[in-house]
Amino acid sequence: MIDKHKAIRALNPQVVTICGEDAFDKNNNLVVYDRNAVEAWVDVDDYKRLRAAEYPDFHDYLDGIVKGDQAQIQNYIDACNAVKQKYPKP
């Protein structure tokens, strides 16, 4: 899901205020923007948010280190790598 306000600002740097679907510049003038371009905009950092939501709990990794459990450590690493493959960097 895109953050429409972030997309509007990324595509229209003159925008300083957004109210609903309307965008305004610093002089409070309405800025007409391409709504289709906003819908199509892709946040290049979106993969970070998606990854963070699915990464395994780092406590499992630390627990594996403390216990010296190589299998647990490797399971954590494998789970992280699976998330990275699911949400690759753009």
Image (cartoon, rainbow, N blue to C red):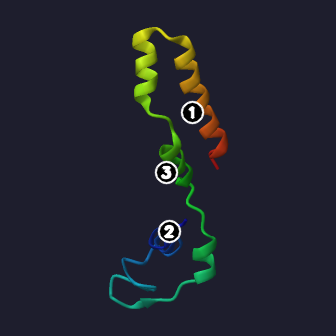
Instruction: Please tell me how crowded label 3 is: few (under 14), some (14-19), or many (20+) other residues with Cα within 10 Å.
Output: few
Q: Nearer the viewer, mark 2 or mark 1?
A: 1
N-term mark: 2 or 1: 2
Q: Left or right of 75: which side holds 30?
A: left
Q: Quadrant of residue 75?
A: top right
N-term mark: 1 or 3: 3
Q: How many circles with numbers are drawn on the protein?
A: 3
Asked if the residues shown at circle 1 and circle 3 are in contact, with their CB atoms under 8 angstroms apart, the answer is no
Q: Which residue is mark 3?
A: 49
The amino acid marked with disc number 1 is Cys
Residue 79, horizontal then vertical, whole percent: 59, 32
Q: Quadrant of residue 71?
A: top right
The amino acid marked with disc number 2 is Ala
Which sits in the foreground, 54 or 20? 54
How far apart in space, not on screen, are marks 2 and 1 (Cα)?
Answer: 30 Å
Q: Which residue is mark 2?
A: 10
How far apart in space, not on screen, are marks 2 and 3 (Cα)?
Answer: 18 Å
In the picture shown, does residue 79 fall above or below 23?
A: above
Residue at image coords 61%, 39%:
84
In the picture shown, does residue 23 fall above or below 55?
A: below
Q: Nearer the viewer, mark 2 or mark 3?
A: 3
Residue 5, horizontal then vertical, whole percent: 45, 73
In the picture shown, does residue 71 fall above or below 54?
A: above
Residue at image coords 46%, 72%:
9
The amino acid marked with disc number 3 is Arg
- In terms of secondary structure, where does tag 1 sit? helix
Residue 25, horizontal then vertical, whole percent: 38, 83
Residue 74, horizontal then vertical, whole percent: 58, 19
Please identify the quadrant where the N terminus is shown.
bottom right
- In terms of secondary structure, where does tag 3 sit? helix
Q: Which residue is mark 1?
A: 80
Residue at image coords 38%, 91%:
29
